[in-house]
Image: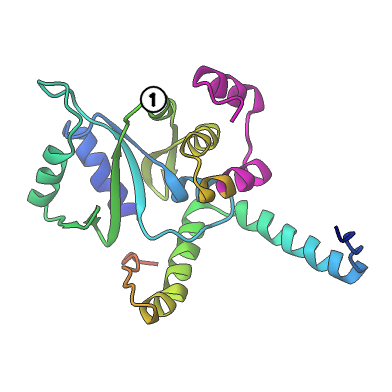
Amino acid sequence: MNKATPLRPEIVRLFDASENRRKQLAALPFPEKVRMVIQMQQMVEPILRARGRSIRIWQVIL
Amino acid sequence: MEKTLQVLNALEHDGIISRYAIGGAMAATFYAEPVLTLDLDIFVVLPETAGGLLTLTPLYTDLRRRGYPETGECVLIEGIPVQFLPAYNALLEEALAEARETLYERTPTRVLRAEHLVAIALQTGREKDHERIRVLKEQAPLDSAYLAVVLARHSLENT
């Protein structure tokens, strides 16, 4: 079995920053997170449509 | 989403459902980072029927009357596909009874407790449920003593 290669410090910093970003997202107000979910739906819709799957993006006032 | 929740509150007020709470990915999003979901999972306690049958038919009929049509497994309520899931076991009944009261903007609503989301995910056990547990354990303010009691009560402590 291969031994895991230690990560370079700059990569560790990137991972830490990503982790912090996720914690910040978790702490946002719920309505703000719902807006982000809808943005994600808008992002994946063309990809899913290209694969033949149609989805309904939530039609709410943002 | 506020208008959708207002419709759910009206259904509860009118006795079409006895109680509801947000579950699934949107409930997980309440406690942790946002995750992509395409529908809003709503767990419901239905009023007792004469034969003790768990049926969503009266709910769907009422929603049609209010102008909200079914689309596949969901009902489109104010622009959001809502999937209604009746509380079909003791864990879900408890989760609904103990759901957290909160406000969505100015509208009161309920969200399942994070500890119950973990327990439900353990019980369901799909790949995405394991991921949900990992994220909730990492980011949600879990009450570990309460979670332990819930898991023990529903024989999930070794899963």
The subunit letter for the residue under badge 1 reads B
Q: Which residues are magenta?
A: B132-159
The quarter of the displayed image where residue B84 is located: top left
Please, is residue A46 above or below residue B47 in the view?
below
Q: Position of residue A12 (x, y in %)?
A: 85, 64
Predominant SS along the magenta part: helix
Q: Nearer the viewer, residue A11 or A5?
A: A5
Q: Quadrant of the C terminus of chain B?
A: top right
Q: Residue furthest left?
A: B65
Q: Which quadrant is home to the N terminus of chain B?
A: bottom left
Colour convention: rainbow
- Look at mark 1 in the image and give the residue it sits on: B97
Question: Residue B153, position in %: x, y?
Answer: 51, 17
Position above or below: B123 against A56: above
Task: Give the residue at x 87% y 61%.
Answer: A2
Secondary structure, mark 1, is: helix
Q: Residue at x 20, y 30 (%)?
A: B54
Q: Is residue A49 above or below residue B25?
A: below
Name the kind of residue labelled 1 in the image. Answer: Ala
**Left or right side of A33 for A25:** right
Q: Is residue B68 above or below residue B61?
A: below
* Residue at the spot 48% in from the left edge and 69% down from the top edge: A40
Please tell me in which quadrant of the rendered image residue B78 appears: bottom left
Front-lying residue, B159 or B51 = B159
